[in-house]
Amino acid sequence: MPPRATQFTQVLLQNGNRAEPVEIWKARHFIHEHSDEGLSLTKVAKSVHISPNHLSDKFKEVTGINFVDYIARTRVEQAREHFRGRLSIVVAVQSRFQKAHTAIAEPISDAS
């Protein structure tokens, strides 16, 4: 499964409109699949069978972003996606709690 194109990880090809080189596609795929692990340039380069220096240079050339920044953005994006649904639940529960707390705290009017 190729990496999803979103506002943070969308690859803007800097080499004209040519297709993304396969080793960069594989590297991005590996990063997305293993972003919750410790990733290094060496580890990703080994996974795509190229040297770390070549990967670093080619990654920046093709994507317009350096390797470390790409990993950081990918992790932030995945965390955002992970918490997006949960945040709306927390807000709804908090809103209901505040309404219930307000209803309990309001003084009861004495009609006498």
Image (cartoon, rainbow, N blue to C red):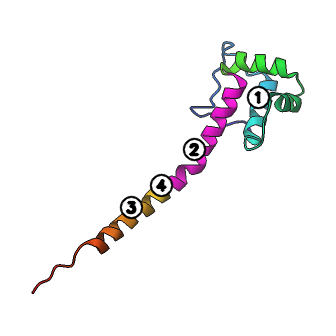
Specify start and end residues of the magenta stretch as a single range: 66-88
Q: Is 101 one of the magenta-colored residues?
A: no
Across and down, in percent, residue 44 comes to: 82, 31
Residues packed near mark 1 inside 10 Å, few (<14), some (14 to 19) or many (20 plus): some
| Residue denoted by label 2 | 80
- 63 on left or right of 25: left
| Residue denoted by label 4 | 88
Q: Which mark is residue 41?
A: none
Task: Kindly report the distance in space between the C-alpha atoms of the residues bearing marks 4 and 1.
Answer: 34 Å
| Residue denoted by label 1 | 25
Q: Which mark is residue 95?
A: 3
Residue type, numbered disc 1: Trp
Residue type, numbered disc 3: Ser
Closer mark to the observer between disc 2 and disc 1: 2
Task: Kindly report the distance in space between the C-alpha atoms of the residues bearing marks 2 and 1.
Answer: 23 Å
Residue type, numbered disc 4: Ser
Residue type, numbered disc 2: Arg
